[in-house]
Structure formats: C-alpha cells, structure tokens
C-alpha cells in the first residue's frame, strides 16, 4: 500500500509533489510508502519525523533544524538537498540517488547515511558537525571546515 502524494498538486508531466512539515516537539511516523515527483520535507524545533520509504522521481529537499530529528529508512530520488543545522540529526538507512546529493550540515548537527549509492556528493560540513556516509559515492566533493568530520 502506498501513500498518495499530497501537497502542491499536479506538476508538469503529470507527477505530484509531496510536502510534510513537523515542528514544536511533535512526533509523526509515516509508515506507508510515499511516491511522488518532488518532495519538500522538514522537521524543526525538537520534532521527530520518520518515513519508512520515500520515492521521488525527481528531487527532494530535506530541512532539519533546532534539535530536530528526521529518519528515512529508504530514500530513492534523482537528486537531493539536505540542510541540517542547530544540533539536529538526519539519518537515512538506504539512499539511492542517480544524481547529486547536496549536503549542508552545520552547528553541531549530524548526517548519517548507512548504505546505498549516489553519483555525486557535494556540500559543506561545518561548525562542529559530523557526517558519515557508507553509501557508494562515485564523486565526493563534500568540504569540511571548523572542527567538523566527514567520514566515508
């Protein structure tokens, strides 16, 4: 059973976009698979958001900030942007990305990617943050600054 994409409605080419935003210390678990064209998801201000399976035929933008947590057990996409900041955590169990994954990890935050594959990783890990990616990366252009770590 798949969760139909909701949010912004039909897009060019007949796909549907998906949006999910959670904040204020709330917790939400999306246990049904989500299939969409593009996704915009966020968890902020001590919220916890978890997805079992998220499949985007094009792009996904993930924002996690202010002591929040976002977990995606399985993510498939064409390209991705991950913005994680202010003591927050993004944990992806398996990532399958045919294009570029752009990572911005800052201010004592953590990005963890357990397995999978991606064509290119780029971005910046900074200000006492930690990133670890155990997926296969064809080209790794992630930069590290200011007492931070990027482990592959």
Image: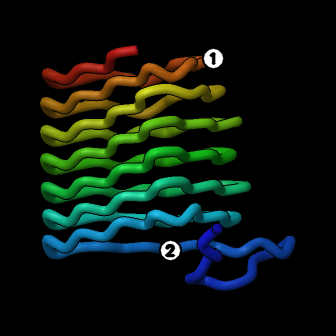
> Residue 101 sits in which quadrant?
top right
What is the secondary structure assignment of the residue under circle 2?
Answer: strand
The picture places residue 84, in percent across and down from the top left corner, at: 29, 48
Does 116 appear above or below 35? above
Does 122 appear above or below 54? above
Q: Name the residue under label 1.
A: 138
What is the secondary structure assignment of the residue under circle 1?
Answer: strand
Question: Which residue does the image show at 64% across and 47% down from the upper left?
Answer: 77
The picture places residue 134, in percent across and down from the top left corner, at: 44, 20
> Residue 49 sits in which quadrant?
bottom left
Badge 2: few (under 14), some or many (20 or more) residues near its Cα, within 10 Å? some
Q: Tell which of 58 and 69 is nearer to you.
A: 69
Q: Quadrant of the N terminus?
A: bottom right
Counting the numbered discs, the total is 2
Left or right: residue 57 compared with residue 4:
right
Residues at badges 1 and 2 in contact (C-beta under 8 Å)?
A: no
In space, the residues marked 1 and 2 are separated at their CA atoms by: 29 Å
Question: Which residue does the image show at 42% across and 47% down from the upper left?
Answer: 82
Q: In which quarter of the image is the C terminus?
A: top left
Is tag 1's residue or tag 2's residue first in the polypeptide sequence?
2
Marking on residue 91: none
The picture places residue 34, in percent across and down from the top left corner, at: 59, 64
Q: Name the residue under label 2.
A: 19
Question: Which residue does the image show at 19% across and 32% down from the upper left?
Answer: 129
> Residue 92 sits in which quadrant?
top left
Colouring of the image: rainbow
The picture places residue 94, in percent across and down from the top left corner, at: 51, 35
Q: Tell which of 33 and 87 is nearer to you.
A: 33
């Amino acid at each position: 059973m798949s969760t139909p994409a909701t949010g912004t409605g039909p897009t060019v080419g007949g796909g549907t976009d998906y949006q999910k935003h959670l904040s204020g210390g709330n917790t939400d678990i999306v246990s049904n698979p989500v299939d969409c064209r593009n996704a915009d998801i966020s968890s902020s201000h001590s919220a916890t958001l978890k997805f079992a399976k998220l499949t985007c035929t094009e792009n996904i933008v993930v924002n996690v900030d202010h002591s929040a947590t976002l977990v995606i057990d399985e993510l498939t996409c064409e390209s991705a942007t991950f913005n994680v900041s202010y003591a927050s955590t993004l944990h992806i169990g398996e990532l399958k990305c045919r294009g570029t994954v752009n990572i911005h990890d800052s201010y004592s935050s953590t990005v963890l990617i357990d397995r999978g594959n991606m064509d290119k990783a780029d971005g910046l890990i900074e200000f006492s943050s930690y990133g670890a990616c155990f997926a296969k990366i064809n080209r790794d252009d992630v930069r590290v600054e200011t007492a931070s770590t990027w482990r592959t």
